[in-house]
Image: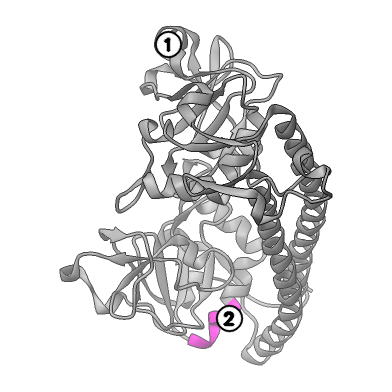
Amino acid sequence: MSEGAWPIVSLGELIASIEAGASFRCRETPPEADEVGVAKVSAVSWGRYDENESKTCLDASRIDPSLLIQKGDFLISRANTVQLVGACVIAERVTKQVMLSDKTLRIQFRDPSLKPWVLHYLRSREGRNQIEALCTGNQESMRNISQKSIRQIQLPLAPAEERDRVIAYLDQQLSCLQASIEIFGTIQAKIKQARASILKAAVEGRLVEREANKSNGRLSDHSSSQDQHEGIAIPEGWSIHQAKTVCNSIESGSTPSKEHFRDSPDEAVPFIKVYHLTFIGKLSFWENKPTYVSKEYHSSKMKRSLTIPGDVLTNIVGPPLGKVSVVPSKSHEWNINQAIARFRCGPTLMPAFLAIYLQSYQAQSWLASTSKTTTSQVNLSISNSRLLPIPVPPIHEQEQIVAEVDRRFSVLDQVEATVTASLARCGVLRQAILKRAFWG
């Protein structure tokens, strides 16, 4: 297990064939028992084959039994982000009829017993470095690796008996690590549920003590104090208004043609896209830097989609819908694209409270019910966005609710940061285990 002890071979020497999938017209939901699906790239992205990450093939004449994924298949993504292109799995559980897509490859080995060895190596840092060096494409969001490049990957090949010992070691160590990762995943799911519960209570008037209930000692979470308006439970003293009556304007953005985009902020304006929005009410440029449009185009064509501090942004094209962000107080001029709606609040509605409501189950359910779904997209019109029923408390209650949501979310943020850091350490430990196995 020391470096140089095993011969280095190309992956092409071990491969009998590589089978490519195809592109199909699909419905976005997974197939039912009597239907045939097509694997999404996410089916092979996260360490295990997930057959539920699939779409339903709508063209029965193009169903090809030879493309159906079988138990034991070695699958690898041909196209994905730079971090996930070349992600690979061995299909351990197969209960649905799911075909390979044009972005997923199946590798057949001359010796099938090599599959776990190759799987672990391609997940090691050395394997990932080669994959990322061999993939092509000039965008972080989409890279490709060809069959020829896959065959060029170099890896150490131990004798059969040593391979068995190394794989047994890896299975033992990585299974313990995976158990920890699953526990952290469960915690993350509970944090998400807690956020949803806080948002639901906030927009129903059950999160903070209300003035109307202080005299009799009751908290506002008593259902008897609530009425139903537009299908939304609200307490006494609140009212329901359509968005267009409590917002000064509700507009979508627009997207200029390519010649108006710029690579730098010089003489240009940041252009906000859906992936800059988040599910926690804030804009994020951490993973995706903003693009820019010329100030000339911005001033003449895009004034209606200009943002100012306090504007509430949400995506009206998905899936998924439900990303919501508030333009911060110290922001420059930004423009939004046509997939984003901009809510500019009037004097009776706080932007932070509107952001809370837009993230809640109540608002998301209403928006989903009024949107139109095609085979690949969910679209919500601006005209329907303006009809969104919004529960509006008195301003002083909005301030209290916003403060309490911020307080509770800050606690969850701390827990989530700890979990995220622990998961990152698990990733480092995984790579240390793989390095020890292959290089000693």
Looking at the image, residue 45 sits to the left or right of residue 66; the answer is right
Magenta region, residue range: 112-117
Residue 170: image location, x then y, percent: 71, 80
Q: Give the residue type at disc 1.
A: Tyr
Q: Which numbered disc, 1 or 2, marks the residue that appears first in the sequence? A: 2
Q: Is residue 85 placed above or below 163 in the rendered structure?
A: above
Q: Is residue 275 placed above or below 28 in the rendered structure?
A: above
Label 1 SS:
helix
Q: Is residue 173 magenta?
A: no
Instruction: Tell me the crowding category of disc 2: few under 14, some 14 to 19, or many 20 or more residues within 10 angstroms, Cα based.
Output: some
Which residue occupies the foreground of this view, 309 or 144? 309
Which residue occupies the foreground of this view, 89 or 108? 89
Q: Is residue 283 visible?
A: no
Query: Which numbered disc covers residue 409?
Result: none
Label 2 SS:
helix
Q: Quadrant of the C terminus?
A: bottom right
Query: Which numbered disc covers residue 116?
Result: 2
| Residue annotated with mark 1 | 297
Q: Is residue 240 visible?
A: yes
What secondary structure is the stretch in magenta mostly built from? helix
